[in-house]
Each structure stands twice: as C-alpha cells, then as structure tokens.
Image (cartoon, rainbow, N blue to C red):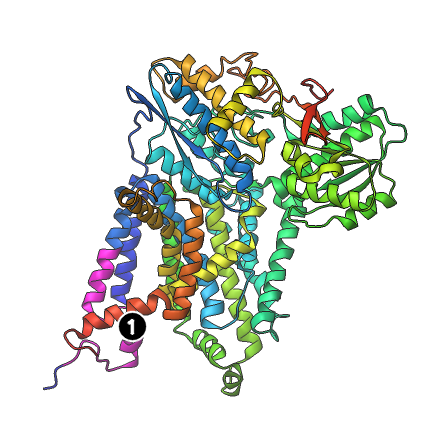
C-alpha cells in the first residue's frame, strides 16, 4: 500500500482547497482565537494601529490585484480611496444610510470611476500608465477641494460612527471587530477571485499580454475589470478609513498615500494575497519597532539617546524598499514561503 | 464545504461576542504623581511643514522647563512628552492614543492643526484632553467644545481686520484689492472673508489668484495683478509662497501694499526678502520678537538660554504663550490636579495678561472662544525685523 504524502493530491478539488492539511486548520483556528482576543490584550493605541493595518490591508489588496496580479501600475490609488470615503460619508451624513449600504456603495462608486479610468489607460503601460493614474489622482484632489457643496472642501467632513441595530461602535475595540470582519471578507473574496478564470486571466495579462490575447483572454474586458475590482477595494478601504477616523479631509488622500500602498505590496509580495497582509501590517507597525530599536540603542549608546525622530522611519522606509527590490523581490511572502517549506521538508533541504 | 461553513459561523460568533464585550475598561487617574506632572504634546517635528511645528513645540517645552526651574507647579516638576505627527491626521490620532493610554499624560497641550484636532475630537471629549490647538476653526468653539480652548484670531477675523485697516487707516483713494491665496482652509476662508468685507466698504476685489504652497515663482500672478492695476494685494498663504510672491513682485518692479496673515507675519519674511518686503504689512495674534514687553523679553531669554536657532520667532512666542496659560491654570487647579480641575481652572482666566505674548485672555465655563484680536506689523527692512504699528484690535 502506498503511503500518502501530506502534500499529495488526488483530485482538482483537493488542489484548490483552501485548508489542505489538518495543521493548516489548527493554526488557522489558533490565529482566529488570537484575532478575537487581540483587543483585550493591548491598549487602545495598539488596537488603533491594528485597525489602521486592516484598512491598509484592504486598500493594498486592491492595488495588488491591479499591479501585482495584472501588472498594471497605478499611482492614483489614493484617489479611489477618496472617492469611496466621500461617497460613504455623504450617504451616512446626508441620507443616514447604514454601513451595509455605504460600504458597497463606496466600493461601487470607486469601481465605476476605476473602470472609466481603465478605458483611456488600456493602451498605456509602465511609466505612461503611472503618469496617467497620477494625473487622475491630482484631478480627484482638485475636485474634492473645489466641490465644497459635496465634499466640504478644505473644511473636510465628519462621519458618524458605525451603528449596528442601534448599537454604536465608538471605541477602538468595537471598531476593530467591524474592520476585522470586513477585512476577512475582502481577503476571502480576493483569494477566491484569484482562483477563478478572472484571476488566471489577470495573471496571464501580467505575464505577457500578447500571449494572453492569443489564448482567448479579452484584454479590454479584463484590464477594465482589474481596474474596477482594484478600485472597489480602494473605495471600501476609503469608507472604512472614514468610519475609523470619523473625519475626512482632502489632505488625507495624497500621492504619498498611493506610494505607501505601493511600498506595502512590494514589501509584502507582489501578486500575493497573504503577502499583502504581511506588507500592510509591516509598514503600519514598522515605526513602532524602529522607535523601540532606537530606545534600546539609546540605552546602550548614550550619544544616540533621545535622537530618534520620524525621519528615521522615512529613511528606513526607503531603505527597506531598496533592500527588498534588490534582495527579495518576492517580498515577505517569499521569505515566509521559504521558511514554511524549510519546516515542512525538515530535515531535508528540499 | 460543510467544514468551511462551520469555520465561518465560528468566526462570526466569536466576532459578535467580541463586539458585545469590547470597550470594557476602567477609568483611572492620569499623569499626576506626588512630585511630577506628565504632559503630552502632538506637533509636527519632521516632514515638509516641520518648520512650523518645531519652534512652536520648543517654545512650549522651554517654558515648562522654566517653570521647573522656578520650583515647578505646587511642588511638582513637569515632564513633556512630544510626539511627532508629521502633520498627518491618522498619525496625530495614534499619537494622542499613545500619550493618553501608554504615557498616561494629564493632558495634551496641543493636538496639532485644524485637521488633526477635528480628527481627535472624539478622543478629546472622551478622555477629557484640555488643549489649545495651534490652529483656529469655528468648530473648536462654536458650539462650545468643553476641552478645547481656542487661542488667537480666526482666519476670518484676521482678514476682516486687514480690510478694516485698508478702509479706515490707509484710506487709499481708488483702492483695488487683488487676492493671492492657496487652496487650503486658510486660503479659502481668507478669500471669502476679504470679499465679504470689501463689499461692505465698496472696495473692488479685482483679482483672485491661486498661488500654491510649493510655488517657486509667482510671475503669472504678479503680471495678472499688474494688468488689473491692483494697488493692494492680500495674501492668504503661508510664509514660503509669500516670500516667493514678494521677490517676484520686486523683479517686475511692482510695489502695491501687500498684506499677510499670522502664518506669514514673522521676522523671517523681512530677513528673506530684504527690500522686497518694504511695503509688507502683516497681522499676528502674538507680540513681535523685538517687543520690550515682559512676556516677549522672557521668550527671547528662554530661546537664548536653550540655544534655539529659531527661524519663525512668532511660533516660538506662541508656544511660550500656550505653556504660560497651562502653567497658570495648573497653579490655579491646586494640589488636586486632574483634567476636570484643570479645565475649571482654565475657565477662570479672565482678562489674563501674558505680558504682551497674547492679547488679554478670557475664558469662562460658557465660552472658550479666542480673543479675535490682532496687531499690525510693518517690515523694518534696514533692521530685518517687523515692528508693531497698531495695538491689539478686533474686527469692527
């Protein structure tokens, strides 16, 4: 009788199963329990950072679908966040609609805008596409600042708290569970999209668009779809941002924010859903680690004590992107995969 | 598939339980021990607008250290923890949470500019953070925000004062106002206030031109103003673009009377522009660096003692003034110092004199509104400084 290997698969169904081994289920359960207990283990500052990581994950996931999976670069991602944020805030503030209407509406509005941007961008690639999307970002910023009646202009807009059955989610801990739920849903959706025909078409376009077209992938349709799905994620992230901060302002959605999301997917891993989570959490939490490192260094080297400032983070941010691009283009996900494979095959090296 | 449904259901139940139990936390006393008071400060230290936050924060820290040298507050020494928000709202919110929940500060002297303070409003009210924002917006005091004490003059009031001055002090015949503004809160509010006030005096506003904050040249704006024969230019922009505008105007031999508000009224402007600033008149709600009032003298001494290389002296003075008010309120609060007693003590400041740093300060339990008073300053080019040309005044 043949002994079945833990990675041996006998059917296509087994091949695409999300939970392939009992250990994966076990660790997933441990992870879920950890997530539920998380806000009770940390203070509101810690929980707030986790909340920001959730928003960043949803937004970066959208960008990864467009850039990492489909190979279309975008410097205008923050603009789609702005569209989502202002849509949700307007609906909540003016019409009093609940979050379960506002979130999809924010995503859909951004998705329509994304599809419209996708049309003129169909023939653009690389640097030209980057410039076109950046120009869109500038355009949205102008509209947001100028259209006072809709956006509040430079005064910004206040957003009421999420309310579930009359129960208002005011504290960071309550917001955490709301954000976590949406993030898990968005991650599951992205994971599934990537396993379908659509996801495989995106990857085919990224790898070689001419070849993809030759095997029957409709470039126009799928490129527009990539823009729309990516923007949907950004729109939802924008709405989550508004619900978390309870206030939005044109200065919250700048080019720098788009660049931060690019950094997240580079550091996390282009074309990887789980890598996006790694990258988002890493970039949001990284300043804390640098601060801790600076404090530890300061206690050892008196000349460094008290010299820490935010410029250290900016320098580390740039350095990290450079290091990842040179030494680990696959990002944290590639590192994670190597460690995982190493453990799985131990004591063998391959 | 059944297994996966169980997982999803399990996660759903766990999240629901979490939602229902989240937010249980016990309140506790903060930031005051037998011999120490810990205060927080959230102000930009690095990034593109660091030049605005640094002198402001240094003024606050230096004055608190000065109080420590005088024996502290009712026997307690003050420690200030300064968090840098890089002028970004999400970072400001994070910094406020860190200061309150980790560093356990009594209060936070300032939570940053308008955008950052509004984003923190919920935490300010829940955690009773008595603070003086380093910006001014109507929503800080209309309606009354229990823990925010507004200081200075709103952008609207500053520009109303400027138009009042043009109409009633300059008394220029055939005055034609051109407005150069940034598409920022201060720019748009300033523009609206100028138009409204100028209409009242029947002074024509002949041009409204945008000058971005990062502008390195203002030729198109200067040429457009020359074409419209604007003999008065009111700038609603911060210091760097106003310097750019003055230098460009000099290049084109264009010499209108040029006005600016508090973020562009500083000795640094005269030093940077030289002769180009000869027609510049600015307003500010703090005294000038070279005033001989006791408060300003103290600010100069503190800067010298702490070896501060200050570019924007008005912001340093502002910082000293903010700490001055907190110091006085903490003294008045007595031994039982907590956010409630601190707030109550701030509300007792009536016609309070800061030795020329600020106009007289008036707060009460029903009003935390700013004084809405400014002084006018004119450039003294040979000496590279601003000199006051009026006393404190309000919009008429």
Look at 80% across and 21% down and name the residue there. B169
Q: Is residue B358 above or below residue A188?
A: above
Residue B249 in percent (x, y) is at: 78, 43
Q: In the rendered view, tell whether residue A330 sits above or below residue B279.
A: below
Q: Residue at x 58, y 70 (%)?
A: A127
Give the image quarter of residue A68.
bottom left
Q: Residue at x 46, y 24 (%)?
A: B63
Please give the range of residues in magenta. Answer: A4-31
Q: Nearer the viewer, residue B170 or B181?
A: B170
Asked whether residue A16 is drawn in magenta, I would say: yes
User: Which residue is disc 1 drawn over?
Assistant: A17
Q: Position of residue A200 (x, y in %)?
A: 43, 77
Task: Residue B39 in the image: state x and y as whole percent.
Answer: 39, 28
Tell me if residue A116 comes above or below residue B119 in the rendering. Answer: below
Of residue B382 and residue A163, the one placed in the foreground of this image is B382
Quarter of the image holding residue B200?
A: top right
- From the viewer's perspective, tell me whether residue B118 is left or right of residue A167: right
- Of all residues, the one furthest to the front in this rendering is B382
A200 left or right of B30? right
x and y, in percent, of residue B374 in the image? 66, 23
Locate the N terminus of chain B and report the quarter of the image it occupies. bottom left
Whether residue B118 can be seen here: no
Residue B182 is covered by the magenta coloring: no
Residue in the foreground of this view, choosing between B73 and B201: B73
Residue lying at the far right of the rendered structure: B174
Identify the secondary structure beneath mark 1. loop
**B211 on left or right of A26:** right
Give the farthest residue toward the left. A1
């Amino acid at each position: 009788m043949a002994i079945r290997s833990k990675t041996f698969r006998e059917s296509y169904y087994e091949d695409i199963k999300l939970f392939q081994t009992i250990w994966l289920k076990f660790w997933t359960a441990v992870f879920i329990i950890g997530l539920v207990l998380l806000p009770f283990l940390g203070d509101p500052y810690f929980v707030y950072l986790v909340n920001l990581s959730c928003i960043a994950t949803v937004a970066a996931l959208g960008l990864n679908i467009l850039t990492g999976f489909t190979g279309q670069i975008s410097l205008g991602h923050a603009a789609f966040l702005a569209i989502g944020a202002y849509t949700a805030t307007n609906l909540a503030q003016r019409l009093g609609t609940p979050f379960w209407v506002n979130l999809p509406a924010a995503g859909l509005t951004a998705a329509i805008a994304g599809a419209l941007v996708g049309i003129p961008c169909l023939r653009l690639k690389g640097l030209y596409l980057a410039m076109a999307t950046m120009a869109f970002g500038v355009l949205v910023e102008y509209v947001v600042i100028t259209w006072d009646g809709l956006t509040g202009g430079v005064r910004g807009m206040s957003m009421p708290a999420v309310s579930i059955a009359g129960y208002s989610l005011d504290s960071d801990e309550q917001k955490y569970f709301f954000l976590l739920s949406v993030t898990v849903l968005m991650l599951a959706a992205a994971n599934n999209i990537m396993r379908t025909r659509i996801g495989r078409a995106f990857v085919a376009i990224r790898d070689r668009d001419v070849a993809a077209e030759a095997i029957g992938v409709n470039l126009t349709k799928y490129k527009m779809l990539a823009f729309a799905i990516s923007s949907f994620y950004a729109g939802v992230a924008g709405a989550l941002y508004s619900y978390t901060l309870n206030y939005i302002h044109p200065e919250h959605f700048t080019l720098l924010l788009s660049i931060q999301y690019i950094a997240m997917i580079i550091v996390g891993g282009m074309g990887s859903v789980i890598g996006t989570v790694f990258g988002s959490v890493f970039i949001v939490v990284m300043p804390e680690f640098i601060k801790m490192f600076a404090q530890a260094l300061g206690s050892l080297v008196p000349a460094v004590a008290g010299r820490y400032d935010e410029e250290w983070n900016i320098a580390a941010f740039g350095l990290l992107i450079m290091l990842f691009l040179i030494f680990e283009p696959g990002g944290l996900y590639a590192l994670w995969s190597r460690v995982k494979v190493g453990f799985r095959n131990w004591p063998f090296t391959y | 598939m059944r297994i996966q449904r169980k997982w999803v259901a399990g996660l759903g139940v766990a999240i629901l339980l979490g939602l229902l139990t989240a937010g249980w936390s016990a309140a506790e006393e903060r930031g005051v021990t037998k011999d120490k008071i810990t205060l927080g400060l959230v102000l930009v230290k690095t990034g593109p607008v660091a030049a605005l936050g640094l002198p402001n924060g240094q003024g606050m820290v230096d004055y608190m250290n000065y109080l420590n040298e005088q024996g502290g507050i009712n026997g307690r020494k003050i420690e200030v923890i300064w968090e840098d928000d890089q002028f970004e709202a999400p970072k400001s919110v994070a910094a406020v949470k860190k200061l309150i929940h980790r560093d356990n500060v009594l209060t936070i002297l300032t939570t940053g500019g308008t955008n950052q303070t509004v984003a923190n409003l919920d935490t300010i009210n829940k955690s009773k953070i008595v603070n003086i924002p380093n910006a001014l917006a109507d929503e800080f005091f209309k309606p009354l925000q229990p823990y925010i004490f507004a200081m200075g003059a709103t952008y609207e009031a500053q520009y109303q004062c400027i138009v009042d001055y043009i109409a009633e002090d300059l008394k220029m015949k055939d005055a034609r106002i051109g407005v150069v503004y940034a598409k920022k809160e201060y720019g748009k509010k300033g523009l609206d206030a100028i138009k409204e006030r100028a209409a009242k005096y029947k002074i024509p506003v002949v041009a409204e031109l945008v000058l971005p904050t990062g502008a390195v040249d203002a030729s198109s704006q200067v040429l457009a103003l020359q074409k419209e024969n604007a003999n008065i230019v009111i700038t609603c922009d911060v210091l760097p673009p106003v310097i750019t505008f003055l230098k460009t105007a000099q290049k084109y031999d264009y010499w209108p009377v040029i006005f600016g508000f508090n973020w562009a009224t500083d000795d640094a402007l005269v030093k940077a522009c030289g002769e180009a600033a000869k027609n510049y008149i600015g307003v500010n709600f703090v005294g000038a660096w070279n005033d001989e009032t006791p408060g300003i003298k103290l600010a100069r001494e503190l800067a010298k003692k702490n070896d501060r290389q200050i570019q924007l002296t008005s912001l340093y003075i502002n910082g000293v003034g903010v700490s001055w008010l907190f110091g006085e309120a903490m003294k008045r609060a007595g031994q039982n110092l907590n956010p409630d007693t601190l707030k109550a003590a701030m509300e007792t400041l009536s016609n309070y004199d800061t030795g020329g740093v600020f106009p007289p300060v008036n707060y009460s339990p029903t009003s935390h509104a700013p004084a809405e008073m400014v002084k006018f300053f004119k450039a003294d080019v040979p000496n590279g400084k601003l000199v006051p040309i009026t006393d404190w005044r309000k919009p008429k």
